[in-house]
Image (cartoon, coloured by chain):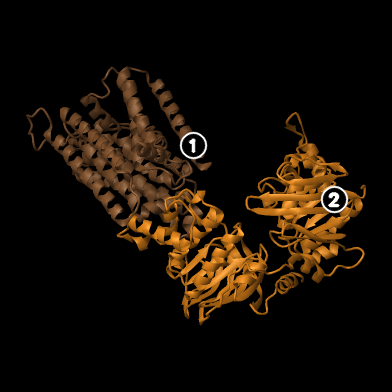
Chain colours: A brown, B orange
Amino acid sequence: MNKVREYIKHNMRQYTMIIALVVIMVLFQWLTDGILLKPRNVSKLIYQNSYILILAIGMLLCILTGGNIDLSVGSVVALVSAMSGLLATTLALPVWLSIIIGLIVGLLAGMLQGLMIAYVKVPAFIVTLGGMLVFRGVNNLILKGMTIGLPKQYVTIAAGVVPDFIGGEASELNLTALAVGALFSVVYIAAVLYGRGKKKSRGYEVSSFLVTILKIAVIIAVINVFTYWLALDNGIPIILVILLVLIGIYTFITTKTIPGRHLYALGGNAKAAELSGIKTKQVLFIAYANMGLLSAVAGIVFAGRLNAATPTAGMGFELDAIASCFIGGASATGGVGTIIGAVIGGFIMGILNNGMSIMGVETFWQDIAKGLVLLAAVAFDVYSKSKSKSK
Amino acid sequence: MSEYILEMKNITKEFPGVKALDQVSFKVRKGEIHALVGENGAGKSTLMNVLSGIYPLGTYDGDILYHGKECKFKNIRESEKEGIAIIHQELALSPYMTIAENIFLGNERAKSGVINWDETSEKAKELINLVGLNEKHTAVIRDIGVGKQQLVEISKALSKDVELLILDEPTAALNDEDSDNLLELLKTLNKEQGISCIIISHKINEVTKVADEITVIRDGQTIVTLDNKKEDVSEARIIKGMVGRDLVDRFPKHVSKIGEVGFEIKDWVVHDPLDEDRVVIDHVNMNVRKGEIVGLAGLMGAGRTELAMSVFGKAYGKKISGGLVKDGEAINLHNVHQAIKHGLAYVTEDRKTAGLVLIDDIKRNITMANLEEISKNLIVNEDEEIGVGEEYRKKLNIKSSSVNQIAGNLSGGNQQKVVLSKWIFTSPDVLILDEPTRGIDVGAKYEIYTIINKLADEGKCVIVISSELQEILGVADRVYIMNEGKIVGEVDKNEATQEGIMSCIIQSTAK
């Protein structure tokens, strides 16, 4: 038991996030008389927050470089949804082409801002503030104040589910979902045990077996309950697949690759990074170009969700994305933060939104609550960091 | 008692691991100009910081008597109220504000928080005239030269009704003309206003011109106080006081195996990035042989760090010209990445701000400059990284609980070892070490000297930049002496002495 406690103490900061998430889930489960965690609502949570999470992933990379944010993401979301929608409807281009062009537009927007921030050295805050206004303006220019309807493929991406290959249309339980859950569990167990075995054979320290087993047990439970819930509802949302793929890719990049290391080094100490041969300008540029791309993805998804491209699309998204990152433990000075953390932060905010909606709380209370949670999360983060520094 | 405006008695100040001041006694007579001289790190600035209240009462031992009264300063404002003003080497002026605003910054002519601009302008104009500053009171600090900025600082001190003016290296950043003017001004203020001055300086020729008394500090102790009025104190006498100490076994024994020339810097010229017309490195020529440890001596501000950083992939400076030759081939280094690829390594002067990512652990800091070595297809092999971390932890004897320990929690000496590991891991051919043992205790210093010797024995070209003459003499095979951006001397280990090097520097300063 001692080893477990020691393990938890060491990784307190990461677990604080998860604990907070669990607490909020339990709290709202109680406040909403159990509606929050009903299968239908769990699906709804995913649909409602997917695009914010996609933005949070990109935003985290920007914040890692040194506390730099991107205020233009909401406007890029709007711009891309408008542009893509227009191409698909008015110009009747094939959907896949419209989507690709939309992604390119987002990427270009990000690259433009990245150029100004990394090479011309204008502060990110100002560049993206300008971007926010300009892209929103262009969006309005394109739409001319109207709202466009979109082809159904967009809706499928945003609101559709993976068809049940195993069970078929008629089955009550989406068996594909269950199967996926089981598959994930097996892969996870194998990966953890393999990695542990390799480390042990090299003579490096590993966490105790008891801790490992407990960790596996908890995660397996969560995965399977989750997939079972999805199975009960309608199956696995396509957007969830997209989300998981993105989370997987970006977590891998940030934790296991050289570009990821360069990102953290730049945020940790820009001068040291530069003098260690890291091309800091390039890293910064790529972070913002990437943000543009992910904003475009979010734009496509959001448009599909609304089944329309509107002039007011994306307003306020940047704040939700930024808040998710900071609630998830990112540091305002850079160099600290994880993709998983940002996702958890996003979920916390999502549950807040969703829970309060179910309860019928007016929107302004929701804003107040979101603001307070953000302040509390960051204050706690600063506090726990100062405690560990004093050693 | 009344002839001394200031008496500092038995001042002792300690920092963790270092005794900066050791029973220092220092007296200044009323109305005199008293010079405080010593090497870098001797304790001059520390002593003045104790006096002015920057190191408040309680952080030092000993007594300070001002006008015969005991002083218990808790901060600068208290010492300023008594009439003690200190002008630091780094001028404390706000660059975007005007001269008048700066003169009264923190000391505004105001009533109930509302500034009286008329009074401010009038008083500023008076002071500007007094110090002979040829500018309007509305001129912005950023637009006037350093010499004039210095005069603004003096005006600032005068506005506080100063009785004892302390100047820390006042002419360090000035050209000859401005220096002369400043010294003349000090003499005038001294004679006409009766202001007592303490000048901290290493420019001995200036000091002998202007000072009434000269006190020499070395290693935190007062060595001697010389009366400049009675007999003309010679520079040689001062230098001996500043530098003379025994070379005990602080350095590991080392026999160098020197080969052919491995690295050359030819006709290197670098301009200031903030002022492209100002030449910072002036036609420097240097070479290092394989297996040789070359020392680069000089005082702070001589341009050694700028030289190193500009050579290291143009990490500093604009309008850089000149050539670099490595192993007989001319190389062009446009950025740090290229420099590293060509086998250069630069261990920065300040490990905390430019050498380490303090929030990262030891192993990640060690691999930072050469991630490709432990990666395949851009994917980092974390197991290999642990291996590398452990390897260097053992090789350099880095004291830590594990390679996962955060770098920021290590002691100075161990942090420096991590930085050294990082660079050794890049398998360099040329290593430039900038103040490698700064802020490190004697034991760790010895370990680092051993590491340096080992690197040389592996056939690498090693350049050691240090402001501690003793260190250079203990470690280097050959010494280049640098001053004001130029190489002013080159001497072999056998012929090098501390006095010799100091004289070389001082002579090259006096024009």
- Amino acid of disc 1: Val
Asked if both marks, 2 and 1, belong to the same chain, the answer given is no
Task: Determine the secondary structure under disc 1.
Answer: helix
Write down the chain letter for disc 2: B
Task: Spot the residue most to the front.
Answer: A2
Residue at position x 52%, y 55% from top?
B415
- As shown in the figure, which amino acid type bears the numbered disc 2? Leu
Q: Is residue B501 visible?
A: yes
State the residue position of label 1: A382
Label 2: element kind: helix
Mark 2 surroundings within 10 Å by alpha-carbon count, few (fewer than 14), some (14 through 19), many (20 or more): some
Q: Residue at x 28, y 55 (%)?
A: A201
Residue B1 lies, in percent from the top left, at 92, 48
CB within 8 Å, label 2 to label 1: no
Instruction: Measure the alpha-carbon separation of dots 2 and 1.
Output: 51 Å
Q: Is residue A75 visible?
A: no
Residue A296: x and y, percent?
31, 42
Q: Is residue A45 left or right of residue A386?
A: left
- Residue that numbered label 2 is attached to: B130
Please state which of residues A290 and A146 is positioned toward the viewer in this rendering.
A290
